[in-house]
């Protein structure tokens, strides 16, 4: 039973919605979208309310109808320098609202008929930025051109210390992995309310997929794993673009980082340090967070503010979950770029990864990633693109450790239980010095609307529509084979591979010995923690 005040809001908003097709009525208020070209858009819609270091709650109700014509504010995040020095991504001015940033954006065809049962693609991305950074309008426009219309929805979620606070205090308060909790709240919002945005949606069971780019892809991968919130039942398919279920540490491993944040904000003497962090002035805690290393610093991908295994949202390490089959048995697409490690190696002075490794295991890694620039990343560039004596070697290792090995590990297991597809981007090898760098395939899937590379967008639209990237569009002549464990000529681990001059099918067997070793190492050490 809704409170009387909320009933009044719903009735008032419904009356407006009945007379204005651009107004949508939700239980907590009404929102007016706008038309741009052949799309109807609703921007900055709150899907939850948040306070600093607290879990997401229901949106705050309001009277009347609000315009949904501007993107919501970015969630607080670190000011970030260019990889290798020099400011490139400044602190976002919109973070002045602190953590009240949980909004989503909706893009759908302007013209809809009752026959259009629009599937929904929920996309999240970024470790820096917000939903406005990923312009997904071309994907919806392409779906209209191919007469396979879809709706795309992007979400904001909390990042850095505000979204992934480590330590026992956060665990005791149930506020671990808040960024994941925000994403779960957004997916549940879709289940409850997306039908209000078009006649083609089933009110109780919308058909939608979850996808992500980079950090969003890693989030999607972890949400497919079983946890206490059944997040792996919240979507029917998954796209993981340039990301995977990367190795993460237990919640307790970040205790020193939590303690450092407490000291930096002068909360050391507080009886409840977490409560102090909640109440300290925003500028003070933001300055403390900005003084910690970022992904473009010497620590590279060895991040302070990252997801942790909390036994709750992340129930166990990914390798154990995948080995035991504790993940969603849904169709999925996993993509990567050929040179995933180059960006992260530009400033990587601290390369103390795999700290559990024995001397013999370190020697094996050194053999598998030799001091030979012709075998380093950017791959297939010979002795070119060398910016340091160990840079190409380090880039090859970091890319495999971060993306290639967990991606292949998942596909090897999932392909025996469900339909999976893999893709490799080798476009842009001429990019100096980073080659086909991390997320450089974004245009393939979301923005490339002309030429042969519309194949990527068409495949994604087909996947959202039918859970199979091989669609029925008349112009489609390419067949994307499923990824299978290579055990015979009929069963091969095939990748849809994009190069500058062509698209073809290649085998997913590059650096097999090295990647197998990395996965065996993770199985050995993660499983015992």
Image (cartoon, grey):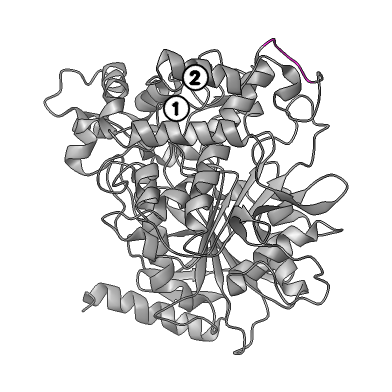
Q: Is residue 504 left or right of residue 180?
A: right
Can I make out residue 226 in this image?
A: yes
At a point 69% along the width and 69% down the height, the residue shown is: 470
Q: Is residue 322 above or below residue 253?
A: below
Could you tell me which secondary element the residue under label 1 belongs to? loop
Is residue 67 shown in magenta?
A: no
Q: Is residue 202 above or below residue 236?
A: below
Kindly identify which residue carries mark 2.
299
Quick check: marks 2 and 1 in contact, CB under 8 Å? yes
Could you tell me which secondary element the residue under label 2 belongs to? loop
Part of the protein shown in magenta: 385-389
Dominant SS of magenta comes to loop
Check the image and name the residue furthest to the left: 271
How many residues crowd around disc 1 within 10 Å: few (fewer than 14), some, or many (20 or more)?
some
Quarter residue 5 falls in? bottom left
Quarter residue 383 falls in? top right
Q: Nearer the viewer, residue 201 or 367?
A: 367
Instruction: Estimate the x, y position of residue 148 in percent, counting from the top left.
Output: 69, 76
């Amino acid at each position: 039973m809704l409170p009387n005040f909320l009933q009044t809001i719903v009735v008032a908003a419904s009356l407006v919605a009945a007379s204005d097709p651009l107004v949508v009525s939700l239980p907590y208020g009404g929102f007016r979208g706008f038309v741009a070209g052949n799309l109807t858009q609703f921007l900055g819609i709150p899907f939850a309310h948040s306070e600093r270091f607290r879990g997401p709650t229901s949106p705050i109700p309001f009277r009347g109808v609000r315009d949904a014509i501007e993107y919501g504010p970015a969630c607080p995040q670190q000011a970030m320098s260019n990889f290798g020095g020099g400011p490139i991504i400044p602190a976002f001015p919109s973070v002045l609202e602190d953590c009240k940033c949980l909004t989503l954006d909706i893009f759908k065809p302007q013209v809809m008929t009752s026959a259009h049962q629009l599937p929904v693609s929920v996309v999240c991305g970024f470790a820096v930025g917000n939903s406005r950074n990923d312009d997904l309008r071309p994907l919806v426009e392409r779906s209209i051109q191919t007469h396979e219309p879809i709706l795309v929805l992007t979400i904001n979620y909390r990042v850095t210390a505000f979204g992934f606070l480590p330590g026992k205090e956060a665990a005791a308060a149930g506020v671990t992995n808040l960024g994941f909790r925000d994403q779960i709240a957004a997916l549940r919002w879709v289940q409850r309310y997306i039908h209000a945005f078009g006649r083609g949606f089933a009110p109780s069971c919308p058909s939608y997929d979850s996808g992500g780019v980079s950090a969003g892809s890693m989030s999607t991968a972890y949400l497919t794993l079983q946890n206490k919130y059944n997040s792996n039942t919240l979507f029917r398919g998954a796209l993981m673009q340039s990301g995977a279920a990367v190795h993460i540490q237990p919640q307790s491993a970040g205790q020193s980082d939590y303690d450092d944040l407490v000291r930096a904000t002068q909360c050391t003497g507080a009886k409840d340090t977490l409560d102090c962090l909640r109440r300290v002035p925003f500028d003070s805690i933001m300055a403390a967070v900005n003084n910690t290393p970022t992904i473009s610093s010497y620590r590279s991908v060895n991040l302070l503010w990252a997801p942790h295994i909390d036994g709750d949202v992340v129930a166990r390490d990914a390798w154990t979950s995948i080995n035991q089959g504790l993940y969603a048995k849904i169709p999925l697409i996993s993509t990567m770029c050929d040179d995933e490690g180059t960006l992260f190696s530009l400033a990587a002075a601290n390369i103390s990864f795999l700290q559990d490794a024995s001397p013999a295991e370190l020697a094996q890694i050194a053999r598998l990633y030799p001091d030979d620039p012709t075998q380093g990343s950017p791959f297939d560039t010979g002795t070119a693109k060398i910016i340091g004596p160990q840079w190409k070697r380090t880039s090859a290792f970091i890319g495999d450790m971060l993306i290639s090995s967990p991606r292949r590990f998942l596909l090897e297991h999932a392909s025996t239980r469900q339909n999976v597809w893999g893709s490799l981007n080798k476009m842009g090898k001429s990019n100096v010095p980073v080659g086909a760098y991390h997320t450089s395939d974004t245009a393939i899937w979301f923005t490339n609307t002309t030429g042969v590379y519309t194949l990527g967008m068409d495949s994604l639209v087909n996947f959202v529509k039918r859970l199979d990237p091989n669609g029925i569009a008349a112009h489609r002549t390419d067949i994307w084979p499923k990824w299978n464990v290579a055990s015979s000529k009929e069963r091969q681990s095939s990748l849809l591979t994009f190069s500058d001059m062509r698209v073809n099918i290649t085998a997913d067997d590059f650096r097999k010995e090295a990647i197998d070793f990395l996965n065996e190492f993770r199985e050995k050490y993660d499983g015992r923690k």
